[in-house]
Amino acid sequence: MEAVQFDVTPVRFLLARSLGRLSSAFVHGSGSGLRRVDRPVPPLPGPAWMRIEVMLCGICGSDLAALAYRSSTALEPFGSFPAVLGHEILGRVVETGPEVAHVEAGQRVVVDPMLHCAVRGSPASAWCPSCSAGRHSTCEMAAEDGSLEVGGRPLQRGLAIGYHASLPGGWSEQIVAHSRQVFAVPSGLDDRVAVLAEPLSIGLHGVLESGAVDVRGPVLVIGSGTIALATVWALRTLGYEGKLVAQAKRRHEAGLAMALGASEVVQPGPAARQALVDTGARAYMPVVGPEVYAGGGFEQVFDCVGSEGSIAQALGFAAPRGKIVLLGCAGRLKKLDLTFLWAREVQILGCVGYGMEEWDGRRMHTFEIALKGMEADSTALKDMVTHVFPLRQYREALRAAFDHRRSGAVKVALAPTSAARPAGLDPRPAETRP
């Protein structure tokens, strides 16, 4: 089967980090560790597994960070390479094991890529505390080989499909997945909406975990990408009724944020400062350093960027005893002033992935909540997937995703086997398009 595979070596790390700034060839081109390859079709590892033909697979910010070697090396023990990337997967079931009961061949499905202890082959009595609690996104066995065999070899280490040498991700024609990872897609849901189930679930998990639905004061969402937009959607879908300010950089992103439920969209800089002042904050200028504020502020801030600048803004914009929810993949930050973390008793909550949630009087998986919300109203979501490319054009797809300012991309997807018509790459800035 055709697949796009990424390999990690010290030499490629050095080339990407040094020469990658000069040429994309060292990030996703001929000088990188990314190649289109022919891989054997993976066998079903057990009776509770299924084979899935990949229709669409999104390109995530974490994929781009991995290719550019911008991710923290702290997570290196929890992945294995060479790996077929891609974890935002929409597919069609083509084969099921005898223990698969909830889906059948021919059905469209989405895939939770995070690996549970059960997926690794462990009996329930040996599950780690996270998996036992339904929080498998923090599985404590991710750095260990599993007892399950795939193709005659033990399952290699890894947190998720897409960063796993044994289980190819969605940048390929087919994958295999365990039954607990797979969720049927409602029949009326468009493919380009259904493929958003994974990023939308990240926003949902952050909102549910933080208790944002019950917040009375204003909420700020920092970020222009898919996770930020997913968070805006999740807040409104789950019932938050207060003032919701979204910070986005470009006009088309602002339009999406408003369509998804933002009360107001501001650009970084003076407009964002004014939004803070509108909450009742008063500005003061220290002898040295940037402007600081007292009073007012946002009761919750969702940082969907994870940079030094976005976290600094979140700390400065949060109300006393407010909460900052980190959904952006923050790593090592060289300079970060944490004064207001303790001076205002601000809480910081990190969220990752998805799992079992308490919602609407039931215990259900985040993907189930996402699919219900998407089915109820998918109108605003239909414009989030802006570009679709066939697998053979993966470099063009990555160029659009990396240079989203020029391409106007929000979510770029690959179509390994789908007949979906590629949106292509429009070289004009989004603001100048008709």
Image (cartoon, rainbow, N blue to C red):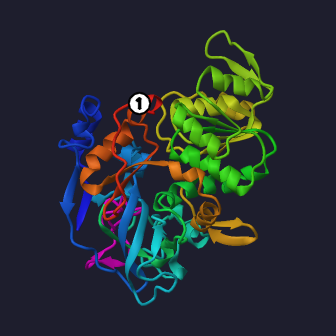
Image vertical order of residue 403 relative to residue 202, above or below: above
Query: In the structure shown, which secondary structural element does the residue marked by tag 1 occupy?
Result: loop
In percent of width and height, residue 332 lies at: 46, 37
Decide if residue 303 is in sight here. Answer: no
362 shown above or below 125: above
- Decide whether the magenta segment is chiefly helix, strand or loop: loop
Determine the image quadrant of residue 402. Answer: top left
Q: Residue tagged by mark 1?
A: 429
Look at 19% across and 60% down and name the residue there.
37
Viewer-side residue, 425 vs 410: 425
Residue at image coords 46%, 85%: 100
Above-or-below relation of 84 to 334: below
The answer to whether residue 245 is magenta is: no
Query: Residue 428: horizontal and vertical position, in percent?
Result: 37, 31
Could you tell me which residue is drawn at 54 percent across and 32 percent down?
Answer: 251
Residue placed most toward the observer, 231 or 81: 231
The quadrant of the image that shows the N terminus is bottom left
| Dot 1 alpha-carbon crowd within 10 angstroms: few under 14, some 14 to 19, many 20 or more | few
Left or right of residue 151: residue 309: right
Q: Amino acid at mark 1?
A: Pro
Residue 382 located left or right of residue 168: right
Residue stretch rendered in magenta on the structure: 146-171
Q: Residue at x 46, y 43 (%)?
A: 410
